[in-house]
Amino acid sequence: MDTLTKHQHRRYSRNILLPEIGKEGQIKLLGASVIIIGAGALGTVVAMYLAASGVGRIGICDFDTIDISNLQRQLSFTENDLGKKKVEILADKLREINSEIRIDTYPELLRKDKANTIFADYDVIVEGSDNPNTKYMVTDIAKNLSKPCILGGVAQFAGQVMTILPGGTTYRDLFPEAAGDGEFMPCSVGGVLGPVPGIVGSIQATEVIKVITLAGTPLAGQLLTFDALTMSFRKIKI
């Protein structure tokens, strides 16, 4: 794609009006592909913003079904969706947001061999799972494939985001070893304030758009942390 239709000009006009994105950036978005790992609180927010922004192809990977406890923060889902597969319901939501883009679903537990094959077909990887082992696997594969990876995490009132670019600082540079028994507290145990993943997912989506369009400066070599109790952000150089 090297031009925009009249309809696309109107649909994405608010992106195009931004000098840092413009027509050229919107064409890049429409031609880009992004795979999202996790269709939970982070992944749903990222997916909806990327679909609305016109990312041409979005993949969603998650094996889970929708539980009533998800509804407190996973706003793509409703009470009518309980028991259904997250990827299928989220895909339907994305098609309602933007029927002109391609949505691919992977309703399965992500394993290393399959992940290598899937990731190779996408431009950018978004890591939004809720466990360290998946984060290590996803970021390791992204490094081996030289793919940008935008990683997010939340716990209670806190969140964090980092953007990993090919050849740059990786997740293992920040966390060399996986959390031991008792050191990792999932949201199902420690809880999470509903809006926190919304904030983190929005930042992840912003980073994806920046990486694709080359707008601004991504969070490469830095960890952005967020504390909702004090409403404060901090950048930590890695």
Image (cartoon, grey):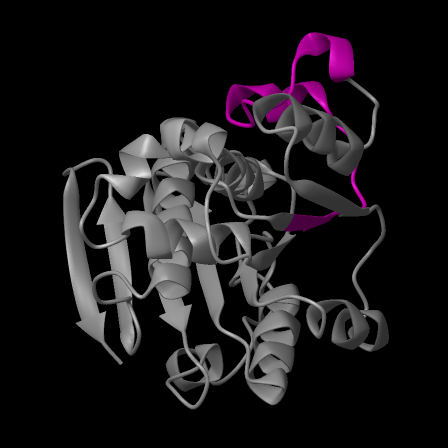
Asked whether the viewer can see residue 143, the reply is yes
- Does residue 119 appear to the left or right of 106 in the view shown? left
Residue span colored magenta:
58-81
Depth check, front residue: 166 or 56: 56
Q: Point out residue 201 in the picture as x, y percentages from the top left corner.
A: 43, 43
- 223 is higher (above) or lower (below) than 157: below
Q: Quadrant of residue 84?
A: top right
Depth check, front residue: 7 or 73: 7
Q: Residue at x 76, y 77 (%)?
A: 116
Q: Residue at x 68, y 31 (%)?
A: 90
Asked whether the viewer can see residue 160, the reply is no
Depth check, front residue: 183 or 26: 26
Q: Residue furthest top?
A: 80
Q: Residue at x 36, y 60 (%)?
A: 213
- Count of numbered circles on the image: 0
Q: Point out residue 110 in the picture as x, y percentages from the top left corner.
A: 79, 61
- Does residue 215 appear to the left or right of 74 in the view shown? left
**Magenta stretch contains residue 64:** yes
**Magenta stretch contains residue 34:** no
Q: Quadrant of residue 86?
A: top right
Q: Point out residue 125 in the picture as x, y percentages from the top left corner.
A: 57, 64
Which corner quadrant holds the N terminus? Answer: bottom right
Depth check, front residue: 118 or 51: 51
Q: Point out residue 221 in the picture as x, y percentages from the top left corner.
A: 29, 78
- 110 is higher (above) or lower (below) than 141: above
